[in-house]
Amino acid sequence: MRIGVDLRPLQDRSLSGVGEYTVQLMTALFRLATEDQFVFFTNSASRSVLLPASWPRERYMHHHHRIPNKALNAALFLLRRPTLRNLCGPVDCFFAPNHNFLPGLNGVPLVLTVHDLSYHHYPSLFSRKKRLWHTLVQPRRIMREASALIAVSETTAKDCINTFHVPSEKIHAIHSGVTTHAVSGHERSAVRTQYQLPAHFLFSLSTHEPRKNLITLLDAYHELRRSGKYTGALVLAGTHGWS
């Protein structure tokens, strides 16, 4: 099978959660789907997209286009052009690891991952630009057009059914994978020294912006310390978002 994959989440200068999800999922698929070939689609007028060196080059084709993103998104929104065949060539199905402006599929089955519907339930937690982007992407329409949806939790699966009335039979709840790394005692000690980490701590890794709800995390941590149930530290890590 030739599987087209939207790798635009890898174009961010630093990988977001969706980008990391995409990298780890493809790494696993190369190991598990040994009979399949992959056709990757990326687009950036200003820079190339470097794919992980560990991915077996003989297993994939990479079509990188240099169309200005705003022009491409406008064409995909208004005309559903270019088509998937224009961007990827012939494929048997197309996988999108997140909502995005998608090409005309012309009957090619679409598999879409839905991470959450926070943009619908809590629009105030998104910047004005992001709210407009989600409106134009039309996630409700894409979810209904998809042949299958991957929801990263049972809660998100139920939310797709209850909020957007997606038929339950085409939703599959599949948790995001966990990557493990062997770390030596020396490496662990070096990281503790570099970041001046205490012996015990709670750890939060996310983009620092309103929808990540860090205020509630701080309130919970304060309550744990106040009640004496936890005496360790709290460590926050991640890039800065908006607000």
Image (cartoon, rainbow, N blue to C red):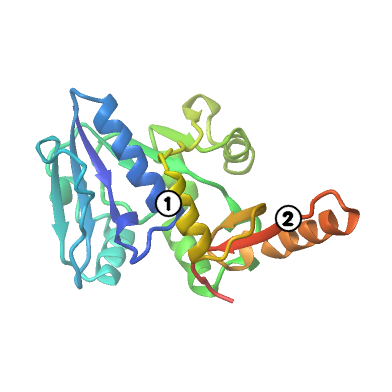
Q: Disc 1 designates what residue? A: 187
Q: Disc 2 designates what residue? A: 232
Q: Is residue 74 above or below residue 173?
A: below
Task: Tell me the quarter of the image containing the C terminus.
Answer: bottom right
Q: Is residue 25 above or below residue 136?
A: above
Residue at the limit of the structure toward the front, as seen here: 186
SS label for mark 1: helix
Identify the residue at horizontal 43%, vertical 50% (top origin): 186
Residue 148 lies, in percent from the top left, at 41, 32
Callouts 1 and 2 close, C-beta under 8 Å: no
Which mark, by number, is residue 60?
A: none
* Of 129 and 27, the residue lying toward us: 27
Identify the residue at horizontal 49%, vertical 28% (top origin): 172
Q: Which of marks 1 and 2 is nearer the N terminus?
A: 1
Task: Tell me the quarter of the image containing the N terminus.
Answer: top left
- The kind of residue on which mark 2 rests is Gly
**What count of labels does the image hold?**
2
Residue 174 lies, in percent from the top left, at 49, 31
Is residue 105 in sight in this rendering?
A: no
Which quarter of the picture shows residue 27?
top left
Residue 242 lies, in percent from the top left, at 54, 74
**How crowded is the residue under tag 2: few (<14 C-alpha within 10 Å), some, or many (20+)?**
some
Identify the residue at horizontal 40%, vertical 39% (top origin): 182
Residue 73 lies, in percent from the top left, at 30, 64
- The kind of residue on which mark 1 rests is Glu
Identify the residue at horizontal 62%, vertical 61% (top origin): 235
C-alpha span from label 1 to label 2: 22 Å
**Number of the front mark, 1 or 2:** 1
- Answer with left or right where residue 201 lies relative to residue 183: right
* Of 17 and 140, the residue lying toward us: 17
Q: In this view, does 228 lie above or below 105?
A: below
